[in-house]
Amino acid sequence: MYAIIATGGKQYKVSEGDIINVEKLGVNEGENVTFDQVLAISGEGLKVGADVNGATVTATVVKNDKAKKVIVYKYKSKTGYHKKAGHRQQYTQVRIEKING
């Protein structure tokens, strides 16, 4: 059984027991979080649309962390212009506990 959820502007295919990284949620480690934007559920057949109204996915926060650094380098030839910047995206790692649907 799996579900497709939407969070942080992205969609994820999850099953019970999966560990995924999502955009930062602002929830402390060890707390539970509920995803209510469920797009599809597969069990005894695929349910989509109005069939998944009220369906939720419950997960537990494993950790909050930052991803590897991404380097952004801007350069224009013949003018001496160059600029270097880095960015570390924050994420929340969650373990899917239960698919309610």
Image (cartoon, helix red, strand yellow):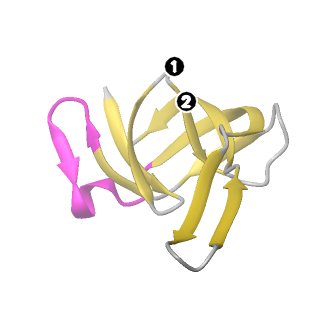
Up/down of 64 relative to 55, above or below: above
Q: Residue at x 65, y 37 (%)?
A: 68
**Residue indicated by mark 2:** 96
Q: Which residues are magenta?
A: 41-55
Residue 98 at x, y percent in the picture: 52, 30
Q: Nearer the viewer, residue 46 or 72?
A: 72
Q: Nearer the viewer, residue 26 or 77?
A: 77
Residue 19 at x, y percent in the picture: 55, 25
Residue 17: mark: 1
Q: Mark 1 and 2 residues: CB-CB less than 8 Å, in contact?
A: yes
Instruction: Place residue 67 in its image quadrant.
Output: top right
- Look at label 2 and name its amino acid: Ile
Up/down of 98 relative to 70, above or below: above
- Look at label 1 and name its amino acid: Gly
Up/down of 36 relative to 30, above or below: below
Question: In the current view of this chain or complex, which residue is farthest to the front?
Answer: 78
- Magenta stretch: includes residue 45: yes
Q: Nearer the viewer, residue 81 or 67?
A: 81
Assign the C terminus to one quadrant of the image.
Answer: top left
Left or right relative to 9: residue 93: right
Would you call the spot at circle 2 few (<14 residues within 10 Å), some (14-19), or many (20 or more)?
many
